[in-house]
């Protein structure tokens, strides 16, 4: 049986991946026009933080076992 905490972790990882795919899709759809501008810092920073969150959730899960 999956505990509530593990279920929340799974949903957090799925949500992070879905949001990263959403950001990448919007970037592809716009042709990555604003890559060099200041406006591109927020999505790139968000992708970095979401990847870090996924890594920490998986790493901490493996470490607890």
Image: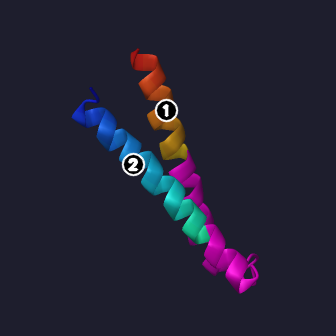
Height in image: 4 above or below 22? above
Q: Tags 2 and 1 in contact by the CB under 8 Å rule?
A: no
Q: Residue at x 75, y 84 (%)?
A: 33
Q: Position of residue 59 (x, y in %)?
A: 50, 28
Q: Depth check: 16 or 52 in front?
A: 16
How far apart are the alpha carbons under marks 2 and 1?
11 Å
Coloring basis for residues:
rainbow
- On the rendered image, what quadrant is the N terminus found in? top left
Q: Residues within 10 Å of mark 1 (few under 14, many from 20)?
A: some
Secondary structure beneath dot 1 equals helix
* Quadrant housing residue 48: bottom right
Disc on res. 30: none
Q: Position of residue 2 (x, y in %)?
A: 29, 30
Secondary structure beneath dot 2 equals helix
Chain-order first, disc 2 or disc 1: 2
Residue that carries the numbered disc 2 in the rendered image: 12
Per the rendered image, the range of residues in magenta is 24-51
Q: Residue at x 39, y 42 (%)?
A: 10
Q: Position of residue 57 (x, y in %)?
A: 44, 36
Residue that carries the numbered disc 1 in the rendered image: 58
Q: Residue at x 45, y 46 (%)?
A: 13
- Magenta span main SS: helix
């Amino acid at each position: 049986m999956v505990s509530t905490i593990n279920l929340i972790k799974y949903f957090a990882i799925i949500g992070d991946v879905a949001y990263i795919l959403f950001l990448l899709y919007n970037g592809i759809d716009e042709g990555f026009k604003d890559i060099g501008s200041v406006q591109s810092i927020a999505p790139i920073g968000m992708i970095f933080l979401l990847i870090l969150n996924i890594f920490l959730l998986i790493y901490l899960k493996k470490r607890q076992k």
